[in-house]
Image (cartoon, rainbow, N blue to C red):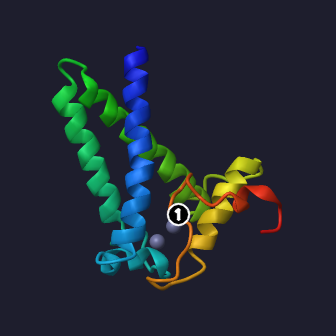
């Protein structure tokens, strides 16, 4: 069980780290054509940028399917990625962007920090001057005081 938890944590952490990297260097780089649909007001519920969620979700499913018989590391890493995906969806898509109106704005200081950091990311609609690319890995200042 400890082992399973470890692999779940690895899958989860790998998503935030690779997500930060991919967001900063690929999505705000050569893949901007796709990602820009998330930085511009969209007319429909879906954005071309959702392809990234489908991509990460497919990796998680492949890992889960390939490790489900033996419940080996692939299965648990897949679970960790999925867990990240669910949390990302709730925090980023529902809470910050309100694609579904499930909750009000967060009051918890940690969640507020995540919220403000991602709002700061969206203060620009351009490729090259965005800040704060992670969901959890964001500059500390966003957690400090109320007004930033
Ligand atoms: Zn972005
Ligand atoms: Zn966003």
Q: Is residue 5 above or below residue 9?
A: above
On the image, the x and y values in percent for residue 119 come to 62, 69
Query: Where is the C terminus found, in terms of image quarters?
Result: bottom right
On the image, the x and y values in percent for residue 9 come to 44, 33
Q: Nearer the viewer, residue 99 or 19?
A: 19
Query: Where is the N terminus found, in terms of image quarters?
Result: top left
Q: Residue at x 53, y 77 (%)?
A: 130
On the image, the x and y values in percent for residue 68 come to 21, 24
Q: Say what secondary structure mark 1 lies in.
A: loop
Q: Visible in this render: residue 105?
A: no
Q: Residue at x 31, y 36 (%)?
A: 78
On the image, the x and y values in percent for residue 105 come to 71, 58
The residue where tag 1 is placed is: 99
Examine the image and state in which quarter residue 139 appears: bottom right
Q: Nearer the viewer, residue 139 or 111?
A: 139
Taking the image as shown, residue 73 lies to the left or right of residue 44, namely left
Q: Visible in this render: residue 37?
A: yes
């Amino acid at each position: 069980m400890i082992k399973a938890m470890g692999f779940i944590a690895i899958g989860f952490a790998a998503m935030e780290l690779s997500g930060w990297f991919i967001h900063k260097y690929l999505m705000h780089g050569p893949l901007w054509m796709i990602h820009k649909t998330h930085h511009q007001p969209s007319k429909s519920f879906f954005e071309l940028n959702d392809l990234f969620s489908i991509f990460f979700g497919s990796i998680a499913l492949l890992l889960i399917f390939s490790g489900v018989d033996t419940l080996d590391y692939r299965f648990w890493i897949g679970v960790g990625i999925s867990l990240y995906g669910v949390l990302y969806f709730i925090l980023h898509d529902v809470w910050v962007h309100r694609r579904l109106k499930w909750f009000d704005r967060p009051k918890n200081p940690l969640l507020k920090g995540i919220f403000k950091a991602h709002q700061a990311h969206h203060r620009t609609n351009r490729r090259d001057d965005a800040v704060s690319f992670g969901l959890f890995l964001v500059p500390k200042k966003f957690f400090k005081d109320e007004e930033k």
